[in-house]
């Protein structure tokens, strides 16, 4: 397998007014992000409200996504605490010829490296053909990968553990493994990460920064002077003042009201915060229209 690299959006899920998953528009949203410059997307990551969407709807989407012209560009997030449900979901995805998965350790319970290694071992023993990007996000699951744990997993499963999304930011500067992909989870880390040998980014705000992020990436590899990285970082910093899912749905709903639909307990920004977000982006002359699924 070729080493994964590039700009990946943790794509948003588009919901109907009854809060069911709008499969067609969710896929269209993801495809438009690739058209705008992303090398691929992570479907059903945290930004896609994966932990809140019924498994049945996820499976229905995978069935349709398997017909997408960009099928090979998608990473499939699991977003499940149950080991059994994770394995069953991955088996269904694998039967549709998806093989790249973004998997976070389960939330709620406290555990350490030994238990995490056992969790991934059981997944890989059940689905040996899978390729896994570890998802390091202590804020959401309560566990933070150590460098030693990642190295142990790669040593044990060199053909299956192929990368990490680092949203805790304790790995991307110092983790060095040959032919292993490292994706910081923010545009703020994109350029520095590339300079350190990272592979790109997987981020929520690439739902609206795809073109700028791709330019920073391409300019780095073409050794062109960076002209837009500071603006990209400033835009990300604006969104970082708020819950990212709330901010992105509020921002995208300025163009298409379908993005106002969001699963409780998540919510849109309140009116004051929404106005502050929009005005701050206007001050940056950020005029990128969000990827609209309609």
Image (cartoon, rainbow, N blue to C red):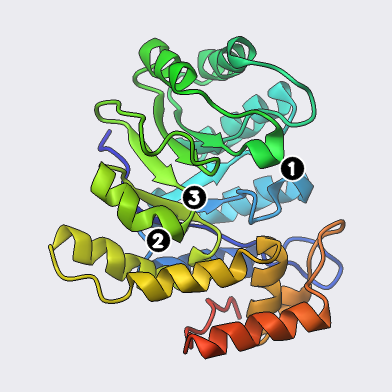
Give whichever of discs 3 and 1 has the lower sequence position.
1
Q: Residue at x 44, y 23 (%)?
A: 147
Give whichever of discs 3 and 2 has the lower sequence position.
2
Q: How many marks?
A: 3
| Quarter of the figure with the C terminus | bottom right
20 and 178: which is toward the camera: 178
* Residue 6 at x, y percent in the picture: 32, 53
Mark 3 to mark 1 CA distance (whole Å): 25 Å
Q: Residue at x 51, y 21 (%)?
A: 127
Q: Secondary structure at mark 2?
A: loop
Which residue carries the number 1 mark? 55
129 and 169: which is toward the camera: 169
Left or right of 206 on screen, residue 216 = left
Mark 3 to mark 2 CA distance (whole Å): 26 Å
Which residue carries the number 3 mark? 185
162 and 239: which is toward the camera: 239
Q: Secondary structure at mark 3?
A: loop
The mark closer to the camera, 3 or 1, is: 3
* Relative vertical location of residue 259 with respect to residue 94 in this rendering, above or below: below
* Relative vertical location of residue 132 with respect to residue 35 in this rendering, above or below: above
Left or right of 256 on screen, residue 235 = left
Which residue carries the number 2 mark? 69
């Amino acid at each position: 397998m070729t080493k994964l690299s590039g700009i990946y959006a943790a794509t948003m899920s588009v919901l109907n007014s009854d809060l069911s998953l709008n499969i067609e528009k969710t896929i269209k949203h993801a495809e438009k992000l690739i058209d705008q410059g992303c090398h691929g997307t992570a479907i059903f990551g945290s930004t896609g409200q994966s932990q809140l969407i019924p498994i049945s709807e996820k499976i229905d989407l995978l069935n349709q996504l398997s017909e997408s012209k960009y099928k090979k560009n998608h990473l499939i997030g699991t977003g499940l605490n149950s080991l059994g449900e994770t394995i069953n979901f991955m088996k269904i995805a694998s039967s549709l010829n998806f093989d790249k998965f973004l998997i976070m350790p389960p939330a709620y319970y406290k555990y350490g490296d030994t238990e995490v290694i056992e969790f991934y071992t059981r997944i890989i023993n059940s689905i040996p053909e899978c390729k896994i990007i570890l998802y390091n996000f202590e804020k959401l699951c309560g566990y933070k990968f150590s460098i030693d744990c990642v190295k142990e997993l790669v040593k044990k499963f060199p053909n299956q553990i192929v990368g990490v999304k680092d949203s805790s930011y304790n790995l991307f500067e110092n983790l060095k493994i040959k032919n292993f992909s490292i994706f910081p989870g923010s545009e703020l880390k994109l350029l520095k990460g590339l300079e350190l040998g990272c592979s790109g980014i997987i981020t929520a705000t690439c739902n609206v920064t795809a073109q700028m992020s791709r330019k920073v990436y391409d300019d780095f590899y073409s050794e062109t002077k960076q002209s837009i990285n500071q603006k990209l970082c400033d835009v990300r910093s604006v969104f970082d003042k708020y819950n990212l899912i709330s901010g992105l749905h509020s921002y995208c709903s300025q163009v298409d009201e379908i993005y106002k639909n969001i699963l409780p307990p998540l919510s849109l920004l309140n009116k004051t915060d929404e106005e502050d977000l929009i005005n701050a982006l206007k001050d940056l002359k950020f005029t990128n229209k969000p990827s609209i699924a309609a």
